[in-house]
Image: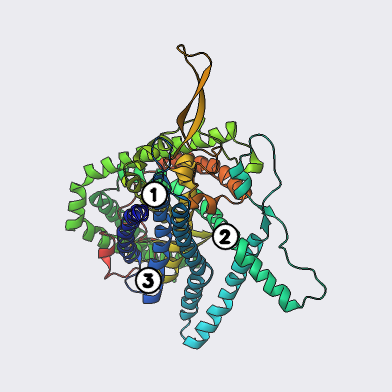
Amino acid sequence: MATSGAASAELVIGWCIFGLLLLAILAFCWIYVRKYQSRRESEVVSTITAIFSLAIALITSALLPVDIFLVSYMKNQNGTFKDWANANVSRQIEDTVLYGYYTLYSVILFCVFFWIPFVYFYYEEKDDDDTSKCTQIKTALKYTLGFVVICALLLLVGSLVCKPELSGAGISKLFLKHRYAFVPLNVPNNKNSTEWEKVKSLFEELGSSHGLAALSFSISSLTLIGMLAAITYTAYGMSALPLNLIKGTRSAAYERLENTEDIEEVEQHIQTIKSKSKDGRPLPARDKRALKQFEERLRTLKKRERHLEFIENSWWTKFCGALRPLKIVWGIFFILVALLFVISLFLSNLDKALHSAGIDSGFIIFGANLSNPLNMLLPLLQTVFPLDYILITIIIMYFIFTSMAGIRNIGIWFFWIRLYKIRRGRTRPQALLFLCMILLLIVLHTSYMIYSLAPQYVMYGSQNYLIETNITSDNHKGNSTLSVPKRCDADAPEDQCTVTRTYLFLHKFWFFSAAYYFGNWAFLGVFLIGLIVSCCKGKKSVIEGVDEDSDISDDEPSVYSA
């Protein structure tokens, strides 16, 4: 009874913190989505979908520290298991986290491959005024069916796995147990079996031993797409966000002065062209085209004049000016955090390049040969719960904000075609769904990014195990053995160290791990390129985006004051 009560107490501690964080995540997602959605085209269903999908991704990431906390708390610092941590209790704790991942990852698959595409295509059809709701639903379901087929194919391919036939020095039992390669499913070939019996046997095989592999393969595929999004947006945003905070925006008064000079210059050109027709002669076609262009330019400049005047006299502008030193401090802090991540990621990847088991193992490392700052810091913080929770939350939020900065600067593109712009208070429902889909995939990749930064922390937390060491004593002849605690790593005995469920989910397939390894190098390269580009770019306009947006109304100047 005491053992069961102690185990329950540890579970309650971990899950209570997780529940509080869940509420904070829901509040953050609601504020974040409401901040960017259009005030004129907001839709309830798209807003709820965006909030829910982003929240599910963040909740899944929040489960990582709980997973690490629970496996770490089963052992003492001297490497022995606690009294209550017997085999049954350990299995119960592991299954609890595993079922949590099953549920959350299944919901993510539902959102990515059904609900978000359905809502997106529904509102695409809604743009046509002559389309009825029934037609909108049918068309949306027709396009969504393609995503459902892709999901089914991923689950099927992921289920065609078995344990690989590998051996040799440097390949640990952990690797042999949890890494997979493709083989056919064990479907009976009995000629007397009916087709229904074969199908039934197939689903029983999937449900018994291949369900975890199928789900892991599907989530790893999405994580791979999230890696590409992180390379594109997060790597650039990590340099653009802090430098934009440090440099700030141009002065509204100075921009207004320049704009007034441009208005006067354009008006002079218009008067010059119109003076040619004072005697009644018609203007040549060339002058008519030039006049039309100057008049269009004049309307744009006057629109800018109104917005600049509003911002210059706004109390919000004065308040932001007073906070300018704080923005510089935040910018310096963010660039230091970015450099910390980049250095840690570089050392981790360099360690894999020099000491890993090779590409066929997914560049798995047996122990940490090159220490990096985060790999040393996270296990230390993990011993004082919830300090590591706080740091993981900061890391995830940092990735969210830098990714958002990258998306706002780059926009959402399909190859060379710009699909949507992300603007505060002016993002269309379809663009909002795209935005949350990209952020969802990036947050999924964050779990592997944290593993790249601190592999031992993600695999084992702060667990130690006992090893026998020979000691030569002067008082006694011969050698004696002494049990010494050692930090758990990939080469540790399976019965002495418990692997987190997160690691088992994200690292079942070596080829995904190999792709993540090369993706990390690409991430570092894009960050350096983005840093150079951000340093060379000048200050942004205080009303950046006004010239390009054709849907701006004159009665909506307050948007830019934010």
Query: Is residue 411 visible in the rendered structure shown here?
Result: no
Could you tell me the amino acid type at mark 2?
A: Leu
Could you tell me the amino acid type at mark 3?
A: Thr
529 to 298, vertically: above or below: above
| Callouts 1 and 3 close, C-beta under 8 Å | no
Viewed as shown, does residue 102 lie left or right of 534?
A: right
Task: Give the CA distance from mark 1 to mark 3.
Answer: 46 Å
Mark 3, Cα crowd under 10 Å, few <14 / some 14-19 / many 20+, is some
Q: Nearer the viewer, residue 427 or 113?
A: 113
Which image quarter is the C terminus in? bottom left
Name the quadrant containing residue 491: top right
Could you tell me the amino acid type at mark 1?
A: Trp
What's the mark number on residue 84?
A: 1
Mark 2, Cα crowd under 10 Å, few <14 / some 14-19 / many 20+, is some
Task: Give the CA distance from mark 1 to mark 2.
Answer: 28 Å
Which image quarter is the N terminus in? bottom left
What's the mark number on residue 47?
A: 3
Query: Is residue 113 visible in the rendered structure shown here?
Result: yes
Q: Which residue is mark 2?
A: 212
